[in-house]
Image (cartoon, rainbow, N blue to C red):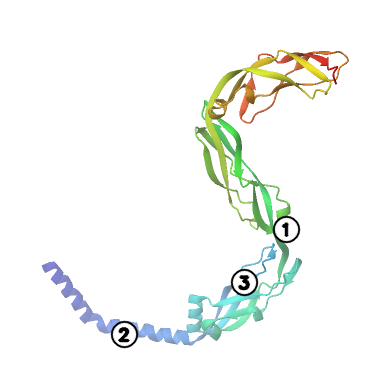
Amino acid sequence: MTYNRTAFQREKNFWHQHKIKIFSTLLAILIWFLVVTGNVYEYETTIPIELSQNNPDYIITSKIPTKAHIILQGSGRYLFSYMLFREARLRLDVNWSPGEHILHPSRENIFLSGNAKNLLIRHFLGPDSIHYRVERLVTLKIPVRNNIVLKPQPGYTIVGDVIMEPDSVRVQGPEKLVAQLDSLDTPSQVRDNLRFRIQEEISLLQPDDGQIKILDPKVTIAADVQRLLEKVIHQIPVTVRYLPQNIDALVHPTHISIKVQGGMQRISLLNANDINAYVEYQSLPDSMLTNAAISIEPISGVTFRELSSERAKITFIRNRDQ
């Protein structure tokens, strides 16, 4: 308590001893500020360049400078206000017809607002000319290229196709650049040890040219992952396809067995009636085809292997009643 009282007493004594000096110093600073801000000065600065209007159907494809250099003149207080608020712009009127164009900015294109209106534009230092190119702005759908690798855990498999939605997205940009764009890419990534259905939203990679904008920047990758199942199906009938109307055929063997492999939900329901084993008819001078290859009609998500017989003997019989 005694320490606090002593500190307060010292501060009080300091103020009484030096208050005249403090007031004198503050008064001197104020007088100096009024004198300085009342004088006229020149000040070199930069101001932003902006377009007086935009056109939704066209785009400027060349680089336009963002700053112009000028010298302002005026009293100190208005220059000080300008330093705080930067109330000046160089506004350009663009010719929006396709092709190459040149602008020649001047001090007449400089717009002052607020307290900056009290300043004089002493010199316009540049840029003296601005070259720019205008192209048509177009929107097209571009295919998406999937670079996401899906790897199921051992003992599991992907059933059916990997689905990507949408498979093409809208992009917007200069007509020539968009026409050269053949696809958009997902990141190159790996999803491994998958055991369940995957559905994931992926952000597309932005094209190298920043003037192309992806309007639909994300796609969804989905795949059905199931436990891998394998079984043998017996008594699958072998048929002959494309037989003429007046010919019958005897096939040996009449039935085969085959090992199937795939997702558990698909394989567990698969039976002999779901599998088409066949031999294609061939017109031969003899009435017998002794070494015909047996084909299996593909089924999505199912792998066939280890046929009990890969070849068949076909005997053709002409039907006399027709």
Three-letter code for the amino acid on which mark 1 is drawn: Glu
Structural crowding at the residue carrying mark 1, measured as other residues with C-alpha within 10 Å and reported as few (<14), some (14–19) or many (≥20): some
- The residue lying at 30 percent from left, 84 percent from top is 23
Q: Which residue is mark 1?
A: 175
- Left or right placement of residue 18 versus residue 46 in this view: left
At x 64% / y 22%, what residue is drawn? 304
Q: Residues within 10 Å of mark 3 (few under 14, many from 20)?
A: some
Q: Please give the residue where the numbered disc 3 appears in the rendered image.
A: 50
Is residue 237 visible to us here? Answer: yes
The Cα–Cα distance between marks 3 and 1, rounded to whole angstroms, is 24 Å
Reply above or below: 320 against 226. above
Q: Secondary structure at mark 1?
A: helix
> Which residue is situated farthest in the left direction here?
2
Callout 2: helix, strand or loop?
Answer: helix
Image disc number at residue 24: 2
Query: Which residue corresponds to the image point at 46% horizontal and 84% vertical from the top-left?
Result: 36
Q: Is residue 84 left or right of residue 270?
A: left
**Above or below, comparing residue 100 to residue 71 in the picture:** above
* Frontmost residue, 231 versus 19: 231
The answer, for residue 306, to whether it is visible in the render is no
Asked which secondary structure carries label 3, the reply is strand
